[in-house]
Image (spheres, rainbow, N blue to C red):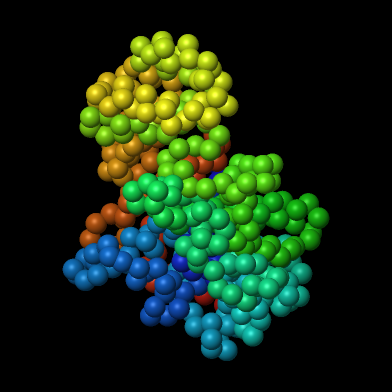
Amino acid sequence: MPQALAGVRVLDLSRVLAGPWATQLLADLGAEVIKIERPGVGDDTRAWGPPFTTKTDGSRGDSAYFMCANRGKKSVALDMASAEGADTIRRLAATCDVVVENFKVGGLAKYGLDYASLSKDRPRDRPALVYCSITGFGQTGPRAQQAGYDYMIQAMGGLMSVTGQPDGAPGAEPMKVGVAVVDLATGLYASNAILAALLHARATGQGQHIDIALFDVQAAMLANQATNYFVSGIAPTRMGNAHPNLVPYQPFPCVDGRVVIAVGNDGQFRTLCAVLGAEALAADTRYGTNAGRIEHRTELVAAISAMTGGMTMAGLMAMLEPAGVPCGPVNTLDQVFDEPQAKHRALEVEQTRADLSAPVRTVASPIRMSLTPARYDTAPPALGQDTRNVLRSIENS
């Protein structure tokens, strides 16, 4: 069975994470992704380590960071700044359905690699071009020319204002998320937009320029926190691990770690109280509704913590899970991939690359499709490993 995106060819001019994350998703689903990299240097993230992989001769390989976002791609080393390199990339673009780039606004025009140039010179026998630009602040606006990086966008876009311990608590300060969530979400929004534009192009013959900004994505990711502000007029603040709209909905202490208890309605709260033998809490009118539990959050959380603090994590979950109270352990990464559920779902992908001394391990795509599942045919490529074969394909074009 062909994959969902079989026959779609993508020219990937992006580097670092947001763009490569989008194009890796397309590659997992069957698109042919040609990654253009600087000769001798490659994507910036090849050097973002340690940790690094090890080559068969014992020398340093590519970074683990690079490996996370570039499987399934073909690496072509070309110097875009040279007239010959730019011309070759233009010829490659003419054979592709999609171009993805994350240069500064207008930065590719001098090479004839901007949307206007590539769509104008489109061969008549090729479908209309879908061109996706990923930048910090978008193609327009007062900050359009400013570079944007995940960390600063988490700050500017409000995420850090609602992440971290509250003022007055130990370690209180605005906190970034432990992974580059803005880059990752930007990649997901970009891939969604690309697929929508491909459907439109095939239905109408019209290509288009997609403008994706990290700042816009971060604003969208504020989700309920943004609408909490719009409705109340009050800017949400940092609450540690507590939830602004639900109680109890946070980690609770055990003798050997912490377990998240996520009560989503009044019925689950009553069940929680019954399981814990806390009939007094269930009968207390202060806690009968979620609104009441939010109002009396501090004392309720303290009461539940006092009960869970003497239990083991396994013991607490063994009580809650059969009763239907949502819960889960606060796992370290090694524990994540040791979870029976992770093993059953095959969340770890192992691939080989000829120049590396050990297999490359990455995380599987979460997309599960009954007829056209994701596949992992090739490992993240060595720099320039596919240059000759890819360029041979356009020799006569």
Which residue appears at 48% of the width and 47% of the height? 238
Which residue appears at 67% of the width and 42% of the height? 232
Q: Is residue 249 above or below residue 205?
A: above
The answer to which of 136 and 265 lies nearer the viewer is 265
Residue 142 seen anywhere in this rendered image of the structure: yes
Locate the C terminus by quadrant: bottom right
The answer to which of 114 and 106 lies nearer the viewer is 106
Q: Is residue 357 above or below residue 122?
A: above
Quarter of the image where one finds residue 364: top left
Locate the N terminus by quadrant: top right
Q: Looking at this rendering, what residue extends furthest in the left direction?
A: 58
**110 horizontally vs 368: left or right:** right
Where in the figure is residue 388, as x and y percent of width and height? 45, 74
Quarter of the image where one finds residue 117: bottom right
**185 horizontally vs 116: left or right:** left
Which residue appears at 32% of the width and 38% of the height? 331
Where in the figure is residue 376, as x and y percent of width and height? 43, 50
The answer to which of 92 and 318 lies nearer the viewer is 318
Where in the figure is residue 85, as x and y percent of width and height? 54, 83
Where in the figure is residue 379, as x and y percent of width and height? 38, 57
Which residue appears at 38% of the width and 80% of the height? 40
Q: Is residue 150 above or below residue 317?
A: below
Q: Looking at this rendering, what residue extends furthest in the bottom direction?
A: 83
Give the total number of marks visible in the rendering: 0
Q: Is residue 266 above or below residue 219?
A: above
Residue 389 seen anywhere in this rendered image of the structure: no
